[in-house]
Image (cartoon, rainbow, N blue to C red):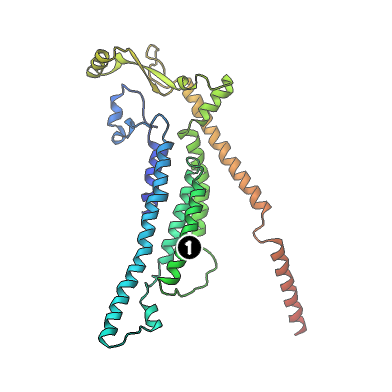
Amino acid sequence: MNFWNNYLALFYLVLVKGKLFSYPGDLGQYTRFFGMAAEVCHPSGCLSRVTVYICFLMLLKKTTLKLFGYGKPYLGYVFRTARARALRIRLEEQVLPQYESEYMLQPIGELHFVGVMMDRILQYGIILFFVSALPLLPLIALAGNLIELRLSAYSLIRKTRRPVPRRLAGLGAWNGVIAATTYFSVFFNAIMIAFTTEFVSRELYRYTHGNLIGYINSTLSEFAVADFEESIRLRLQATNNISFCYYKGYRHRPNETEKYKHNDEYYYLLGMSFFMIILFEHGVLLLTGILAYAIPDIPFVIKEHLAYEDQVLSVAKRKS
């Protein structure tokens, strides 16, 4: 549930909004897919909305939840201490022993650190999934985590009871979650760069024309006002006296045989976008494989020290 609460709106902005729109005169898009087909992005693109939502998620929402999380143990401690002091006053005992004062602290539940780990995984996923939309996102997360580190340490030491330590071999099932998030984020970023941004179309235009002069006009298609519904057509012609309008898309002109259908340039860009996804994904996986091979899991010094300890242990066993 936390996954959908944090990611669903972002996935909609990146993958759905503006992708189902056809052309202005298509009235069926207002009922298709519950009306989502008629939604379009701002002229600046959907990534601006994604950036705003990420800033809200990382700053405002997280700050509010953390203030509530840190304030809850403090308020519980104040309430329980005041009740205990009132009882001591009635019993004519003014000093509260240390063990009783520490018992008044907020107890740590068995699933406390599961929630903490869940927050870390959600933040890790947001950074990996949407770093293409907001490149400063890792820096924002680092600054927030440094502040949260000190607040968490203060809350754990001063406002909660001492947790019972338990030895664990590792992160357990979280390793699989982290690995799945990492691999899926590569594919998601490739899709976002290929279909949500204008990177592919812009670079292809630059490659074929040598510059970006006239690029905006090349992304627009023509629509005849006469093809609108009668009420809309009469209102536009009476107020603006225009015959054509333009919308973002790669479709045939109204005077062509297959008017308002996708043209050859659309399918060319679609194929190049899929090629870019494959190229980006394989490039990232190849780079991570090279880095994983170059950086050993166990440093050479530690591996050498472990081998020396095994040799000393075997010599001691033979002597005994």
Nearer-the-camera pick, 219 or 177: 219
Looking at the rendered structure, the secondary structure element under dot 1 is helix
How many labels, in total?
Answer: 1
Q: Quadrant of the C terminus?
A: bottom right
Q: Quadrant of the N terminus?
A: bottom left
Using residue 283 as the reference point, say whether residue 2 is left or right of it.
Answer: left
Q: Quadrant of residue 257?
A: top left
- Mark 1 = which residue? 150
Percent of width and height locating residue 267: 48, 25
Q: Quadrant of residue 159?
A: bottom left
Q: Amino acid at mark 1?
A: Arg
Quick check: 9 above or below 82?
above
Quick check: 134 above or below 276?
below
Quick check: 290 above or below 235?
below
Percent of width and height locating residue 229: 25, 19
Percent of width and height locating residue 137: 49, 46
**Number of residues whose C-alpha sits closer than 10 Å to that of mark 1, classed few (under 14), some (14–19) or many (20 or more):** few
- The residue lying at 51 percent from left, 42 percent from top is 135
Using residue 153 as the reference point, say whether residue 284 is left or right of it.
Answer: right
- The residue lying at 75 percent from left, 73 percent from top is 311
- Residue ranking furthest to the bottom: 92
Percent of width and height locating residue 250: 44, 22
Nearer-the-camera pick, 139 or 43: 139
Nearer-the-camera pick, 292 or 47: 47
Quick check: 141 above or below 157?
above
- The residue lying at 41 percent from left, 40 percent from top is 50
Using residue 302 as the reference point, say whether residue 42 is left or right of it.
Answer: left
